């Protein structure tokens, strides 16, 4: 029996990864280590509470004592999903991103060294490569982050690779593209727009909406991380993307039409985000060489995601009150007035 310590497992991608592991791998136990922040939602793993191979520990990856206690009982691998992840929030509060993303990664790496853990997977992002006008980023490209979020993730990546070079710590990095699907906190573009449109509210599109992103379904992303854990070579980076490059405006139109609304009355262009990257794209040749490839067609995945939010209002409606309302005002009200 292999034991995985999954940090940030109550979050969006982390919870899907845990469910995948428990479903597809009978020989794995999972310890879910999560700080239960605004995006670490216990409801994401509520169905796993009684699973015989699942255990939850509340803890922060910046707390070395808590991390060591979780790892000391015998762990075969750590998979790190724990992070502050939203660019918009990083602009409002960059300090939190440095603490969690950079210091947290360091604490985990030290635990790997101390307890001779067999593998450490750092789940990163395509945003560390920065804006590219054409082509696709490969794992050997220079890191050129342009937001506090992407800079904090790049800082973590560089630490991870430094531990490989210096201590031969058995590390792997995965860098995923924009991810969508069920259980995503409604601050991100797709769930924000879906939930707004369900309620008949307008959706805020940054600038001209022509920013391009490559989209991957969360199930494909989770499978990519698991594949890298099991088949990747230590010291390597693997890009994981869906091969579905769309502009934000194209995504907006698909969502508006699918939910029976109109572009004229339900789309509002707001002042663009500071330093907003225009385009990301990933070359996934290396991950495909391991035997992984995306399986969920974008149109099908988006339809299923819309349907999930339609039929799970009891999950997302409580999240759109309190803290979320205050964040939404801070992020969009001034932009709307200035547009």
Image (spheres, grey):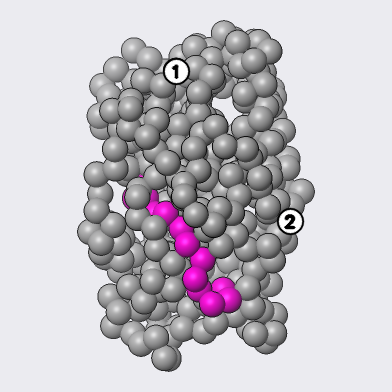
Residue at figure coordinates x 54%, y 77% from the top left: 208
Residue at figure coordinates x 68%, y 53% from the top left: 147
**Viewer-side residue, 191 vs 207:** 207
* Magenta-highlighted residues: 206-218
Label drawn at residue 307: none
**Viewer-side residue, 92 vs 311:** 92
Q: Report whether 269 appears left or right of 13.
A: right
* Vertical relation: 263 (above or below) 37: below
**Viewer-side residue, 120 vs 184:** 120
Q: Label 2: how many residues lie within 10 Å, few (<14), some (14-19) or many (20+)? A: few
Q: CA distance from mark 2 to mark 1?
A: 35 Å
Q: Could you tell which of marks 2 and 1 lies nearer the N-terminus?
A: 2
Query: Is residue 97 located in the magenta-colored stretch of the structure?
Result: no
Q: How many marks?
A: 2
- Disc 2 is placed on an element classified as loop
Q: Which residue is mark 1?
A: 233
**Viewer-side residue, 329 vs 29:** 329
Q: Label 1: how many residues lie within 10 Å, few (<14), some (14-19) or many (20+)? A: some
| Residue 259 x/y as whole percent | 30, 77
Q: Which residue is mark 2?
A: 93
**Quadrant of residue 83 within the rendered picture:** top right
* Vertical relation: 116 (above or below) 312: above
Residue at figure coordinates x 50%, y 73% from the top left: 209
Q: Quadrant of the N terminus?
A: top left
Q: Quadrant of the C terminus?
A: bottom right
Label 2 vs label 1, nearer the camera? 1
């Amino acid at each position: 029996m292999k034991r995985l310590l999954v940090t940030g497992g109550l979050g969006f991608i982390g919870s899907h990864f845990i469910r995948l592991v428990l479903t597809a791998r009978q020989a794995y136990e999972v310890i879910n280590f999560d700080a239960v922040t605004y995006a670490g939602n216990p409801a994401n793993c509520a169905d796993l509470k009684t699973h015989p191979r699942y255990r939850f520990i509340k803890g922060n990856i910046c707390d070395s004592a808590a991390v060591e206690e979780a790892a000391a009982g015998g762990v075969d691998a750590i998979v790190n999903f724990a992070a502050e992840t939203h660019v918009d929030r990083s602009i409002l509060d960059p300090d939190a991103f440095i603490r969690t993303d950079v210091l947290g990664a360091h604490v985990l790496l030290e635990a790997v060294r101390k307890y001779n853990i067999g593998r450490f997977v750092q789940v990163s992002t395509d945003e560390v490569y920065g804006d590219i006008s054409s082509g696709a980023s490969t794992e050997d490209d220079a890191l050129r982050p342009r937001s506090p979020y992407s800079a904090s993730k790049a800082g973590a990546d560089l630490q991870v690779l430094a531990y490989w070079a210096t201590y031969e710590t058995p590390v792997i990095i995965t860098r995923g593209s924009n991810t969508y699907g069920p259980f995503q906190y409604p601050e991100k573009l797709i769930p924000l727009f879906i939930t707004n449109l369900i309620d008949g509210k307008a959706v805020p599109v940054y600038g001209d909406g022509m920013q391009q992103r490559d989209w991957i379904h969360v199930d494909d992303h989770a499978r990519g991380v698991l594949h890298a854990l099991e088949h990747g070579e230590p010291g390597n980076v693997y890009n994981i993307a869906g091969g579905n490059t769309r502009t934000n405006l194209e995504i907006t139109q698909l969502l508006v039409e699918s939910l029976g609304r109109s572009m004229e009355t339900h789309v509002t262009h707001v002042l663009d985000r500071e330093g907003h990257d225009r385009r990301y794209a990933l070359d996934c040749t290396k991950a495909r060489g391991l035997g992984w490839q995306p399986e969920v067609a974008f149109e099908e995945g988006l339809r299923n995601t819309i349907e999930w939010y339609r039929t799970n209002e009891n999950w997302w409606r409580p999240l759109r009150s309190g803290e979320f309302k205050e964040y939404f005002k801070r992020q969009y009200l001034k932009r709307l007035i200035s547009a």
